[in-house]
Amino acid sequence: MYSWKTIRTFCLVLLLLPVIHLVYLVSRDTLALLDASPEAWNHELEAYARADSNGPLPTNPIVVVGGRRVSLWTDLEGFLAPRPVLMRGLGDATVEDITHNYSRLVGYYRPDTVVLLPSNSEFHIRDNKSADDLVHAIQELFALDDAHGITRRIYIFTPVKTPLHPGDDTTIDRAAMLLEAWSAGQEKVTILDSNAILANGDGRPKPDYFRSDGINLSEEGYLRLSLLLQTAVERENQQAVSSLNQL
């Protein structure tokens, strides 16, 4: 017969296990964020590999890449159905992290379409990019993808302005301008700027579209991103059909 003290200790340990697990996950993610190496997200890449081994891969999927913002984007599949969508958020990865892990994160799936949603870590904690630095990193990722000759269309979201970091606005505006200018010479690249539909009347981000951290999007914010991407994909599909009909 176990003593009451032993039973109470055992029950306390059971109650604390979820808390201990949460602390472990937060500590691991924090260490990864502070680790400048692109290998910092290997545990997430391995988790995707395990999930992929459970069944056949979709044909010609839309692969969405980025950092935590992609991982938190949970309802996009419904907006783009029946096309298969793979959400491949990688920690709080920068564009360079995605480029380094391209073969496992993107190329492996032989995607028809790639969607890039840059992370807040491009400007804070993990990196401190200028607008020119970010655009150069995106161009390198595009060049790598283009060299594989598989992806038919690439949608690139401009960086998202946030309530927490108004000082980023000038950098983000310049990055958007540079991306638009560059994409004019790239037939398969479409630039999507969500900042206008996430803003108040004064042009600043509307807090309702963001979580309490002032960085990550709320459900209402993601709804607007989903509709923006859905509209762009449908427009491109209609143009492709129209071109075929003219042949």
Image (cartoon, grey):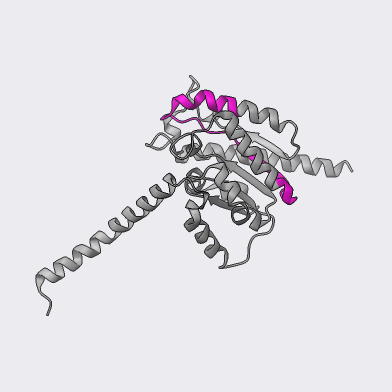
Residue closest to the eye, 131 or 78: 131
Query: What residue appears at the point 49 percent right and 33 percent down from the top-left corner?
Result: 128
| Start-end of magenta stretch | 146-175
Query: What residue appears at the point 52 percent right and 33 percent down from the top-left corner?
Result: 129
Rendered position, 162 above or below 76: above
Residue 146 location (% of width, % of height): 72, 46
Q: Residue furthest top?
A: 202
Could you tell whether 50 is left or right of 164 in the image? right
Tell me which corner region of the image, top left, top right, bottom left or bottom right, holds residue 61. Answer: bottom right
The quadrant in which the N terminus is found is bottom left
The quadrant in which the C terminus is found is top right
Query: What residue appears at the point 60 percent right and 42 percent down from the top-left corner?
Result: 116
Residue 6 location (% of width, % of height): 13, 71
Query: What residue appears at the point 19 percent right and 63 percent down from the top-left corner?
Result: 12
Is residue 231 visible in the rendered structure shown here? no
Is residue 19 visible in the rendered structure shown here? yes
Residue 228 location (% of width, % of height): 60, 36
Residue closest to the eye, 28 or 34: 34
